Image: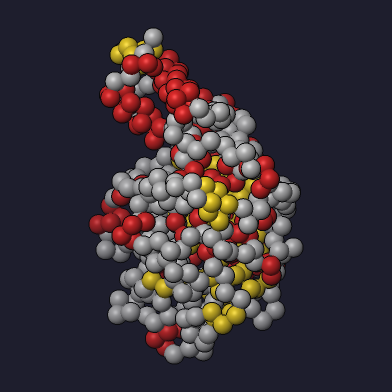
Amino acid sequence: MLRVLGHSSSIAGLTRRDLLRAGSLAAIFPGTAAVSAAFSDAAGTAAVHGKAKSVILLDLFGGPSHIDTFDMKPDAPEGIRGELKTIPTVLPGYRVCEHLPLLAQRLNKLAVVRSVTHKYNSHNPYGVMTGYDGGHDQTDYFSKPTNHPSVPSVCQYFGVGRGKELPGYIMLPALPGYTQGLHRAGPYGGYLGPRWDPVFSTADAHANDKIAEDKNFYNPDIKIAGEPRLPKLEGAITLDALNNRRSLVQQLEANAALQDSVNHTVRRDAAFDLLLSPKAKTAFDLSQEPLKLRERYGDDLFGSSVLLARRLVEAGVSFVTIHTEARPNGHWDTHENNFNMLKKLLLPFLDRALSALIDDLSDRGLLESTLVIVTGDMGRSPRVNGKAGRDHWPQCGFALFAGGGTKPGIVHGTTDKIAAFTTDHPVSAGDLVSTVYHLVGVDPESTVPDHTNRPTHISHGGKPIAGILA
């Protein structure tokens, strides 16, 4: 007999209420669903030697403007070039936005891709995290079990980056859509099953609601405070209750395995391990970092998230994603006040936090083995609209790469004179994920079974970006 939250139930006679309870547990604790796909017998064949032992993705949610950052067109007409000026960089002849002075002097450590182009015009990381850009808002805006799996989910499915003491895949500061109470598509295991979902840290979704009421919402004195925290459970839950919940999930999985005659190893419950692990608590303790370094990253939610990403990588986590969502220094959907938002909040945040991360990883000898990627949903339209903003433009965008087997000091791809379309070396969403697979040691040509058991190409036709590989 099994005791859960005061109710007795046996695995042979689970009630509908018990099953619903177990389903909610699977949602809270990724990696516990009995219906997850069995680990493929062919998984080992997809793993090859890779230069990157860990990956940090900085997801600039909302769509960062490429024409105001790394692909500026100062000679374009006034209604296109915008208000921001350019400055020289450490790379001869290449100029970037004046509000990126720290990164301008570190571009010899990064590869800049200016020719990202795809078809997925939507506000979530589904395209860039899975490589599939055929989605639509009507069907793929929210997470669902039939979505394509994210890169870290696929890698763990193939045995690359699966955690031992800590989960292999963590997302900071919370799941995409957390400020709106929804689950945006992108970071999940999709049809491979929730056992390959990330573990999400938590953050106060509405800690700074007053920002929305402030008409001057690009005020640099207003910031999203706080730090990512370990996953939080509903109510007051004791360790005994945690163990009871773990037991129920284990019995459900064992029962499903027996009924389906599936012989597979169930991954340890990542959320339990994170909650109960002293190593996790130590990694999440940012107070152990010198105050000067914390200030260097930025004393706000997203600066703290980038610093925590470095600590998690150092502790052995293979995949960490920072999802920048809440205003004022996280949301890049600049339909209005594009130039004020960029110069007062968004670009200073990116310049400060990313340059700190590159320096920190380099100083610790971790940059060579850590792949850092920066990208967003899409670029922004060349033409400035009537609200001093730029609208969605998936036809062009940028991505930054550093470390992990990439070639530093490279500017890859060009666009036309108004940054509307690529003119050479176009890079698709599939190319982006294929590059990551190649660098972490997963064969980009591999397939996985989808929800109908059809073999599906993990890179969706993409190829590694040869020009940025060391």
Q: Is residue 368 left or right of residue 452?
A: right
Q: In which quadrant is the N terminus drawn? A: top left
Vertical comparison of 405 with 182: above or below? below
Q: Nearer the viewer, residue 88 or 386?
A: 386
Rendered residue at 28%/24% (across/down): 16
373 relative position to 79: left or right:
right
Q: Residue at x 52, y 30 (%)?
A: 262
Name the residue rendered at 39%, 82% in the picture.
383
| Quarter assignment of residue 240 | top left
User: Does 243 sit left or right of 112 as displayed?
Assistant: left
Name the residue: 30% across, 50% down: 180
Q: Where does residue 232 sit, x and y in percent of width and height?
A: 40, 32
Residue 260 in the image, given as x and y percentages of width and height:
46, 29
Q: What residue occupies the far left of the structure in this picture?
A: 213
Q: Quadrant of residue 408?
A: bottom right
Work out whether 170 lies above or below 258.
below
Could you say where residue 434 lies in the image, as x and y percent from the top left? 61, 59
* Residue 121 visible in the displayed image: yes
In this orientation, does residue 309 appear?
no
What colouring method underlies this structural image? secondary structure
